[in-house]
Amino acid sequence: MIEVRDLHKTFGDVRAVNGVSFTARDGEITGLLGPNGAGKTTTLRMLYTLMAPDSGQVLVDGVDASVDPTAVRRQLGVLPDARGLYKRLTAAENIDYFGQLHGVPAGLLRERREALIDALDMRDIAGRRTEGFSQGQRVKTAIARAMVHDPRNVLLDEPTNGLDVMATRAMRHFMHRLKAEGRCVLFSSHIMQEVAALCDRIVVIAHGRVVADETPDALLAQTGETTLEDAFVKIIGTDEGLAA
């Protein structure tokens, strides 16, 4: 479980995150939505300890990220906005490298790598260098790399961005699998079809603050709208949200 308590982050005169609080629970998929510049990516970077908050608290399975960031990283699998693969390594070598960084024993690492390659339908690309990979192939490799240490909490920043229909379906299936395994899944997206298909709960951030934290059905009822896109626009108060 990921608990976010009153996070604040300022860059010069810009208050990027202004008191964000929410909880992403085990066995659920939580969507983090917001227009461009709302503070989503900054919030995610503080959650996975790439950036320290000015104030507030991030708890991952009860561990305070500011007190023991290493322990928090062990409990997190992260697909960042920049996928960051090593182009000269094969997909399998990218996965192995991150498993080694996490201290996964060699025999267990082989088992997990092979299981992830099968789960993400990567068998045809596992032995290829990642330079020249398609967007879908890069995302699959980055997710396998993020999951090789078997984290209980998964943060995915725009996991289906740029994917074709088949790759999107495969990613959706994989996220449902993570949920069924009882993991906590938090993902950022601007694709409302994905949000509707995946999310148990939706957290909407605008102007650095949480402006909604509800189930999809509750958001529709609260706004009186029939689609999540229209509900989202009403909640943030501007059509600019459609370009988020």
Image (spheres, rainbow, N blue to C red):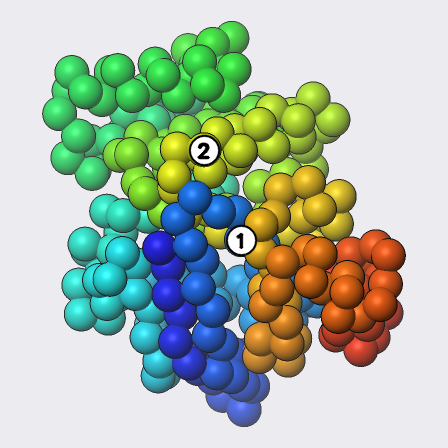
**Image location (x, y in percent) of residue 60:** 30, 59
Which secondary structure, mark 2?
A: helix
Q: Is residue 178 left or right of residue 107?
A: right
Mark 2 and mark 1 lie on one chain; the one further toward the N terminus is: 1
Residue that numbered label 1 is attached to: 30
126 up-or-down from 197: above or below: above
Which secondary structure, mark 1?
A: strand
**Image location (x, y in percent) of residue 32:** 58, 59
Please identify the quarter of the rendering in which residue 92 is found.
top left
Q: Is residue 136 left or right of residue 35?
A: left
Residue that numbered label 2 is attached to: 180
Q: CA distance from mark 2 to mark 1?
A: 14 Å
Label 2 crowd (10 A; few <14 / some 14-19 / many >=20): few
Looking at the rendered structure, the kind of residue marked 1 is Thr
Q: Is residue 198 left or right of residue 17?
A: right
Residue at the (22%, 22%) spot, across then down: 109
Residue at the (74%, 74%) spot, across then down: 236
- For the C terminus, the quadrant is bottom right
Which is closer to the viewer, label 2 or label 1? 2
